[in-house]
C-alpha cells in the first residue's frame, strides 16, 4: 500500500472516475486509489503523479503506520459505542433510562449516528434526506471497520404556533454601516452570519461546512447576511445589533407536506413543539395528522416551563393524543431553549423543570426527557437531584436527554478543519461528487467521535443506584 504526502497547505480533495485526487489548481495534483482489506481500511495508493511549481509528492510503498493506528483507534471507539448504544434498541433505552437524542441542525449525524438512539431534524424532505445520507455514511464506515451498529430512530419536529425553535434571523445587509463592528457575526454560535469582506476561507466554512457538514469545492456563497439553512433561531443576534436591524421570522410547516413525509418508511417519530396558550392549536395539529400518527413508534411533545399550568396542560394534551397513540409517548421538558453551549449554569433550568414535573401528582403517562440547556454538566446535575433513581424498578424517573447546541459546538470545530486537512479515506462509491463528509477525514473523525462518545457515555453507561 502507498500513501501520498503533499508539501504546503490548501490541498483540496476531489473525485473523478472513482479515484480520489488531491488538487492544488495548476500547481500539481496526486491521484490516489482507495484500498480495503478484510480487516478494514488499508489506505490509499498513488496511481499517478503530476508535479508543478516545486510541489512534490512523496510515495511510500510500506504500510502507513499512522493510518493503521487511526483505523484501529476508530474501530475500537465505534465498537465501544456500539456496545453501549446500538446493542439495545431505542425503545429499550427509553425503558432503562438511557435514551439520548441528537437535535440535528446540520450533518452532525455523521458523528453521532453510532452513539445516540434518535436523531431529531426539521420536517423537511431535503433535511430528512441529508440526515439519512449521513446515517448511511456512518453505518458504511462502521462496516468497513468491521463493526455492526444499529440505526437510530429518525424524528421530525413541527410546531403548532409561534416557537423559538422554528424561526430564522433576517436583516438587510445593505443597511449595515461599513464601519459596524458586526457583533452579530461574532455572537452567532452557528456561524450563520457572514459578510463578503470576510476571508474566503471563513466564507467557505460558513456557507458549506457549517451548513452541510461537507467540504465543498464549489461554494456559491457570494452575499452578505444570514445563511438561512444554518440559522437555528437561537436569537442571540437580535438584541445585539446596535441599529436594531435584525428580526426573526417564524414559520409553521404545511401539515399536508408533513403528513406525506410521515407516510414514508423513513420516519419513526414526531415531536410537536407547543407552548402557553397553544392547546387549541395543538389539538388541531393532532387532528389533522391523526391518520399518519397511528403508525409512528413514538410521539413526543416539547413543552417549556408553564408554571402552575404545566400538569393540567400535559394532561389535556395527553387526552388529545390517546386516540392516535399506538406507540410510545414522551414529554420533552425544554428548560432553557437553545442554550446548552453557553455553560454549566444553562442546565439548571432543565433539571429543575424535570424535578418539578416528576414530583407532581396527576402527571399523565409518558417518558420524561430533558432538553434546553443540556450539556456535559446535565448528568451530574440529575444525579445530585436523585433523578436517576427508578420509580418502579423498570422505568427511570428521567428517561433521557436531548443534546442540541452543545453537541453542535463540540463537533463544529472539527468540521471547520476539514478544508485544511490533506489526506482522506474514500469509503463510498460516490465518484464525481465534490462533497466529502467528515467520515473521509480519519483524524478529524476520531477527535469528533471521541468527544461525542464522552458526551453520551455518562448517560449510556451510568450505573443505576437501587
Image: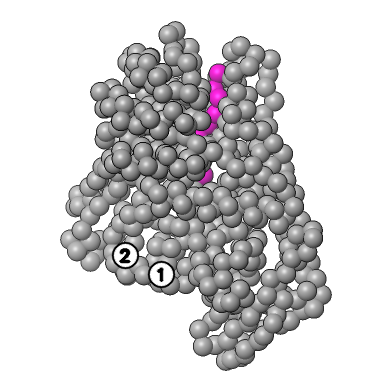
Label 1 environment density (alpha carbons within 10 Å; few <14, some 14–19, many ≥20):
few
Which residue does the image show at 49% across and 29% down from the upper left? 298
Corner quadrant of residue 205: bottom left
Residue 164 seen from this side? no
Name the quadrant of the C terminus. top right
The Cα atoms of the two marked residues, 2 and 1, are separated by 15 Å
The magenta region covers: 397-407
Which numbered dot is residue 219?
A: 1
Residue 394, position in %: x, y? Answer: 63, 16
Q: Which residue is mark 2?
A: 195
The answer to which of marks 2 and 1 sits earlier in the sequence is 2
103 falls in the magenta region: no
Taking the image as shown, residue 84 lies to the left or right of residue 416, namely right
Name the quadrant of the N terminus. bottom right
Residue sitting nearer the eye, 49 or 132? 132
Taking the image as shown, residue 62 lies to the left or right of residue 386, namely right
Residue sitting nearer the eye, 148 or 227? 148
Residue sitting nearer the eye, 157 or 22? 157
Amino acid at each position: 500500500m502507498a500513501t501520498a504526502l503533499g508539501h504546503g497547505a490548501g490541498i483540496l480533495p476531489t473525485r473523478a472516475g472513482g479515484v480520489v485526487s488531491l488538487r492544488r489548481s495548476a500547481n500539481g495534483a496526486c491521484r490516489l486509489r482507495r484500498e480495503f482489506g478484510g480487516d478494514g481500511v488499508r489506505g490509499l495508493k498513488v496511481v499517478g503523479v503530476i508535479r508543478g511549481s516545486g510541489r512534490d509528492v512523496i510515495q511510500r510503498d510500506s504500510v502507513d503506520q499512522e493510518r493503521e493506528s487511526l483505523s484501529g483507534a476508530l474501530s475500537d471507539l465505534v465498537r465501544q459505542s456500539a456496545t453501549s448504544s446500538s446493542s439495545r434498541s431505542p425503545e429499550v433505552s427509553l425503558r432503562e433510562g438511557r435514551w439520548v437524542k441528537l437535535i440535528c441542525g446540520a450533518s452532525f449525524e455523521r458523528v453521532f449516528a453510532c452513539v445516540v438512539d434518535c436523531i431529531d431534524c426539521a420536517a423537511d424532505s431535503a433535511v430528512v434526506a441529508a440526515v439519512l445520507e449521513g446515517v448511511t455514511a456512518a453505518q458504511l464506515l462502521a462496516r468497513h471497520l468491521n463493526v455492526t451498529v444499529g440505526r437510530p430512530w429518525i424524528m421530525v419536529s413541527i410546531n403548532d404556533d409561534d416557537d423559538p425553535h422554528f424561526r430564522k434571523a433576517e436583516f438587510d445587509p445593505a443597511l449595515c454601516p461599513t464601519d459596524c463592528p458586526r457583533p452579530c457575526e461574532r455572537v452567532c454560535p452557528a456561524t450563520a452570519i457572514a459578510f463578503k469582506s470576510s476571508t474566503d476561507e471563513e466564507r467557505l466554512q460558513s456557507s458549506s461546512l457549517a451548513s452541510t457538514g461537507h467540504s465543498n469545492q464549489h461554494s456559491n456563497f457570494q452575499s452578505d447576511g444570514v445563511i438561512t439553512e444554518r440559522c437555528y433561531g437561537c436569537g442571540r443576534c437580535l438584541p445585539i445589533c446596535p441599529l436594531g436591524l435584525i428580526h426573526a421570522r417564524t414559520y409553521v410547516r404545511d401539515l399536508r407536506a408533513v403528513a406525506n413525509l410521515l407516510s414514508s418508511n423513513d420516519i419513526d417519530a414526531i415531536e410537536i413543539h407547543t407552548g402557553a396558550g397553544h392547546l387549541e392549536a395543538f389539538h388541531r395539529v393532532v387532528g389533522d395528522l391523526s391518520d399518519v400518527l397511528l403508525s409512528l413508534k413514538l410521539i413526543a411533545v416539547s413543552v417549556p416551563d408553564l408554571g402552575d399550568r404545566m400538569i393540567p396542560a400535559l394532561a389535556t394534551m395527553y387526552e388529545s393524543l390517546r386516540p392516535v397513540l399506538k406507540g410510545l409517548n414522551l414529554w420533552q421538558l425544554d428548560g432553557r431553549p437553545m442554550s446548552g453551549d453557553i455553560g454549566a449554569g444553562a442546565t439548571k433550568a432543565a433539571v429543575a423543570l424535570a424535578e418539578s414535573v416528576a414530583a407532581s401528582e396527576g402527571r399523565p403517562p409518558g417518558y420524561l426527557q430533558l432538553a434546553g440547556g443540556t450539556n456535559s454538566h446535565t448528568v451530574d446535575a440529575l444525579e445530585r437531584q436523585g433523578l436517576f433513581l427508578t420509580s418502579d424498578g423498570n422505568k427511570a424517573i428521567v428517561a433521557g436527554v436531548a443534546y442540541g447546541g452543545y453537541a453542535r459546538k463540540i463537533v463544529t470545530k472539527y468540521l471547520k478543519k476539514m478544508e485544511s486537512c490533506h489526506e482522506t479515506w474514500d469509503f463510498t462509491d460516490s465518484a464525481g461528487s465534490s462533497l466529502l463528509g467528515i467520515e473521509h477525514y480519519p483524524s478529524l473523525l476520531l477527535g469528533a467521535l471521541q468527544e461525542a462518545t464522552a458526551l453520551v457515555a455518562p448517560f449510556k453507561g451510568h450505573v443505576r443506584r437501587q
